[in-house]
Each structure stands twice: as structure tokens, then as C-alpha cells.
Image (cartoon, helix red, strand yellow):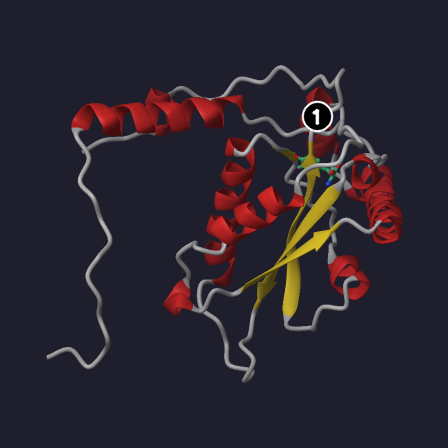
């Protein structure tokens, strides 16, 4: 007899054509997802964003500790403060900290220290990783768990028709300070969320073919 509580699994077997359609349609949706750096200032339905965050919070995590906090920022003053602090870090990155190799790798993306999207996008989501629980006990596999949740968040927002950017100004300590998060939480991802600007253009990139990323045994 197990010493833990169980319940029946909620699982419905699908026929193969339905499985194939679902897999291909999700793959196509992910193929059209792009990192957007030019956002429209148009408002977005925030209930949709909350649903996407709720979806992300269903991610598996080490010992089911769910070591994440999602901060949804729509307040223009806070967005401005985040932009100013991020641009300060980015300026020092581009001017002194980035290696020549790194700058060369970024050149085709056209990024620089100007981060207008942090004010233009109607919402910012900051995902925090919690290293400790409320009793001060260590969480497990925190980066892996929060990374999975972030992937689910980005795909949920994409499927809901919203654009995102995995922006990671470095270091991101200012986010915890600005948003009053406890020391046991570290900012893991900052993503603007919104509609792309009408004239938005993105770098022409190529993603690896399935054969290049898959090894089968
Ligand atoms: N954080 C900087 C630099 C940057 C780094 C990588 I790796 C990117 O894929 C993109 C940008 C910035 O956001 O501009």
C-alpha cells in the first residue's frame, strides 16, 4: 500500500491522425514564434496573459516545489524604472563587458543598449526563481524547473497571439530590488508581452533542421 495519496490519471487516448495534427500544428506555431524587439503600445487583454502565466505554472518542478514567481508589470512608472535600470546594465555590457566574439555574434541581431520595448510593450513579465521555500529550505532543480515554466509561458503566449522576447539584461539583480522581491528569489527572465509594432521586422535567422538536432537509437 502506498503511503501517499493518489488519484486516477486524467488521460484520454487520441487516434493517431489527431495526434499527428496536434504535433504538427504546435510545431508550426513554434516555427512562427520570433523574438520581437519592436512592440506596439496597443493594449492587450490581460486576462489572456494571466491564463498563460497560469499555464506556465503547471510546469513540472523538482519535488513539485513550484519554485517560481511571475511578476506582471503594466504600471508605466515601474516599466520606465525597469527600462532605465536595464539600459544602464546594457550600456556597460555593450561598452565594456561584452567580448569581441559576443558582439560579433550579436551583430546580425541588431541589438544595442536601447530597450524601448520595456516601455512600449503594454506588459512585462518577470519570472523569478525561488532558491528557498517559505521555511528557508532549499528548492531542487530550480533553474531546470523555472526554465521549463518559461518555455511553457512563451509557447502559451504565442498560441494566444501575443509576442514575447526572452530579454535577460545582465546582471538582473535590479529587478528583484525594483519589484520588492525577497533575497531568496532571483530574476530569471524578463519578457515584454504585446502585439508587434505594425512595421516590425525581425532578423532573418535559420533554425536547425530536425536531422541536426535529433539523434535516435
Ligand atoms: N543582454 C543584451 C545582449 C544580448 C545577449 C544575447 I546571448 C542575446 O541573444 C541578445 C542580446 C541585450 O539584450 O541586448
Q: Which residue is mark 1?
A: 196
Tell me which residue sits at (22%, 57%) in the image: 9
- Image position, residue 192 (x, y; %): 70, 40
| Badge 1: residue crowd in 10 Å (few <14, some 14–19, many ≥20) | many
| Image x and y of residue 63, in percent | 37, 69
Residue extending furthest left? Answer: 1
Give the secondary structure at mark 1: loop
Task: Specify the quadrant of the image occupied by residue 179.
Answer: bottom right
Quadrant including the C terminus: top left
Which image quadrant shows ligand 1? top right
- Name the side, left or right, on which 31 lies relative to 161: left
In the visual, does 141 lie left or right of 74? Answer: left
Q: Seen in the image, is 128 located left or right of residue 81? A: left
Q: Residue at x 64, y 67 (%)?
A: 185
> Residue 55: horizontal and vertical position, in percent?
48, 49
Does 81 appear above or below 215? below
Q: How many marks?
A: 1
Question: Which sits in the foreground, 42 or 24?
Answer: 42
Q: For disc 1, does the CB lie below 8 Å from ligand 1? A: no
Up-down relation of residue 184 to residue 17 (above or below): below
Q: Quadrant of residue 68?
A: bottom right
Asked if residue 125 is positioned above or below residue 156 in the image, the reply reads below
**Residue that extends furthest to the bottom in the rendered view of this protein:** 135
- The N terminus sits in image quarter: bottom left
Quarter of the image for residue 122 reads top right
Residue 52: x and y, percent?
A: 54, 45
Q: Residue at x 71, y 68 (%)?
A: 181
Front in this rendered view, residue 200 or 103: 200
Which is nearer the eye, 143 or 77?
77
Task: Please tell me which residue is depicted at 19% across the width and 61% down the height of the picture.
Answer: 8
Amino acid at each position: 500500500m502506498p503511503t501517499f495519496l493518489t488519484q486516477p490519471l486524467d488521460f484520454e487516448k487520441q487516434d493517431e491522425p489527431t495526434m499527428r495534427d496536434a504535433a504538427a500544428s504546435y510545431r508550426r506555431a513554434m516555427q512562427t514564434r520570433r523574438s520581437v524587439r519592436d512592440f506596439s503600445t496597443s493594449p492587450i487583454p490581460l486576462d489572456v496573459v494571466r491564463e498563460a502565466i497560469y499555464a506556465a505554472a503547471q510546469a513540472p518542478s523538482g519535488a513539485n516545489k513550484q519554485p517560481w514567481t511571475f511578476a506582471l508589470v503594466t504600471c508605466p512608472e515601474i516599466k520606465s524604472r525597469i527600462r532605465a535600470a536595464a539600459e544602464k546594465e546594457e550600456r556597460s555590457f555593450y561598452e565594456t563587458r561584452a567580448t569581441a566574439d559576443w558582439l560579433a555574434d550579436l551583430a546580425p541581431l541588431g541589438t544595442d543598449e536601447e530597450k524601448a520595448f520595456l516601455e512600449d510593450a503594454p506588459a512585462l513579465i518577470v519570472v523569478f526563481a525561488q532558491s528557498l521555500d517559505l521555511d528557508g529550505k532549499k528548492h531542487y532543480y530550480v533553474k531546470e524547473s523555472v526554465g521549463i515554466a518559461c518555455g511553457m509561458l512563451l509557447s502559451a503566449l504565442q498560441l494566444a497571439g501575443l509576442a514575447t522576447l526572452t530579454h535577460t539584461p545582465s546582471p538582473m539583480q535590479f529587478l528583484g530590488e525594483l519589484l520588492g522581491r525577497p533575497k531568496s528569489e532571483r530574476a530569471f527572465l524578463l519578457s515584454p508581452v504585446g502585439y508587434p509594432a505594425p512595421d516590425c521586422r525581425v532578423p532573418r535567422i535559420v533554425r536547425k533542421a530536425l536531422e541536426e538536432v535529433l539523434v535516435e537509437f
